[in-house]
């Protein structure tokens, strides 16, 4: 081994490598803020209690945005520093610390400014809420909160925020195929109905409906609207009578495809019924029944 050469290459690497990256630089790369700067990052506590605090300040000469009208207005005063939870870095919790400015708005009066990293009075940054909501699809809400050092309430609120946004912006046009299915909960004592879109290019959950009765499913299709219901050409469902009735009444143009499990079950019941009758008839006529206990000849 040529130690001198090895030592030289390590030395070369040191001299030619990029300067060590600072957390401020990292934040600017992944979460740049317009009109604000990351002023300093400090670490508080040790071990499990360690957390990072990134102080944010406004850019020099920048004017705050009024949260009422969204227009830049003159500053009025500053409030005490407020903390906003951000996505943990190397699993170390990090919060932004910022003293919100109040604006003197001629239209809205004295208002707290709006900032680009969080909305309203939320204590979590928007990016963190997206992050939590995306992990809550893979882990339980409790596990998500524990893994990323936040509360169950924050995970719940993040999911609600993302779901509300999705519902507000979802596109319901062009649905031509749906599936209607039931799910039990509360140890099998209660039911809910799930409605899915099952078109070739788009498969998604459209509705979670309490119960599996006529009124609840009728209400779902009424909310969907007569025009959209008329575009549905295929519905897959099981043979639960209220489903069949509602589908026939609300989606008259649709073909109701029944699921294979229930059809096979009904077919087997019919074959069994015929077999029993034949066995009885053969026995009455003095013959030995050959299919007494089975549908199959062994
Ligand atoms: Zn205003």
Image: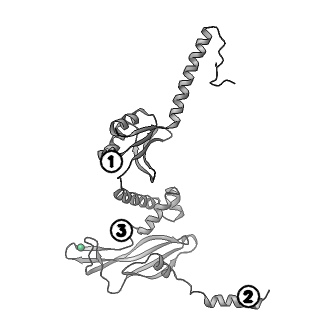
C-alpha distance separating marks 1 and 2:
71 Å
Which labelled disc corresponds to residue 6? Answer: 2
- At numbered mark 1, what does the secondary structure look like: helix, strand or loop? helix
Q: Quadrant of residue 274?
A: top right
Residue position marked by numbered label 1 in the rendering: 228
Foreground label between 2 and 3:
2
Q: Counting other residues with Cα less than 10 Å from the Cα at mark 1, is it few (<14), some (14-19), or many (20 or more)? A: some
Q: Quadrant of residue 201?
A: bottom left
Foreground residue among 255 and 124 = 255
Foreground residue among 216 and 24 = 216
Where residue 290 sits: x, y (%)? 66, 17
Seen in the picture, residue 188 relative to 269 is either above or below; the reply is: below
C-alpha distance separating marks 1 and 3:
34 Å
Foreground label between 1 and 3:
1
Q: Counting other residues with Cα less than 10 Å from the Cα at mark 3, is it few (<14), some (14-19), or many (20 or more)? A: few
Residue at (38% x, 58% y) in the render: 166
Residue position marked by numbered label 3 in the rendering: 119
Residue at (37% x, 34% y) in the render: 245
């Amino acid at each position: 081994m040529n130690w001198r050469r090895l030592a030289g290459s390590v030395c070369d690497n040191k001299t030619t490598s990029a300067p060590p990256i600072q957390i401020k630089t990292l934040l600017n790369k992944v979460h740049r803020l317009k009109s604000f700067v990351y002023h300093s990052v400090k670490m508080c506590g040790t071990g499990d209690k360690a957390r990072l605090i990134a102080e944010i300040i406004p850019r020099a000469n920048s004017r705050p945005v009024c949260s009422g009208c969204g227009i830049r207005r003159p500053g009025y005063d500053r409030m005490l520093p407020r903390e906003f939870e951000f996505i943990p870095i190397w699993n170390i919790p990090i919060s932004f610390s910022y003293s919100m400015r109040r604006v003197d708005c001629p239209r809205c009066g004295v208002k707290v400014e709006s900032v680009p990293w969080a909305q309203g009075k939320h204590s979590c940054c928007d990016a963190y809420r997206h992050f939590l909501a995306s992990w809550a699809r893979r882990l339980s809400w409790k596990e998500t909160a524990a893994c990323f050092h936040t509360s169950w309430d924050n995970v719940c609120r993040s999911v609600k925020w993302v779901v509300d946004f999705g519902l507000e912006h979802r596109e319901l046009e062009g649905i031509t195929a749906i599936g209607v299915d039931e799910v039990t909960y509360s140890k099998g004592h209660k039911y809910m109905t799930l409605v899915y879109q099952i078109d070739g290019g788009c498969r998604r959950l459209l509705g979670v409906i309490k119960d599996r009765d006529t009124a609840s499913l009728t209400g779902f299709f009424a909310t969907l609207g007569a025009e959209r219901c008329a575009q549905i050409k295929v519905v897959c469902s099981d043979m639960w009578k209220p489903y069949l009735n509602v589908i026939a009444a609300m989606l008259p143009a649709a073909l109701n495809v029944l699921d294979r499990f229930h059809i096979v079950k009904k077919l087997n019941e019919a074959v069994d019924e015929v077999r029993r009758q034949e066995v009885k008839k053969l026995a009455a006529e003095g013959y030995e029944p050959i299919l007494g206990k089975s549908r199959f000849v062994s």
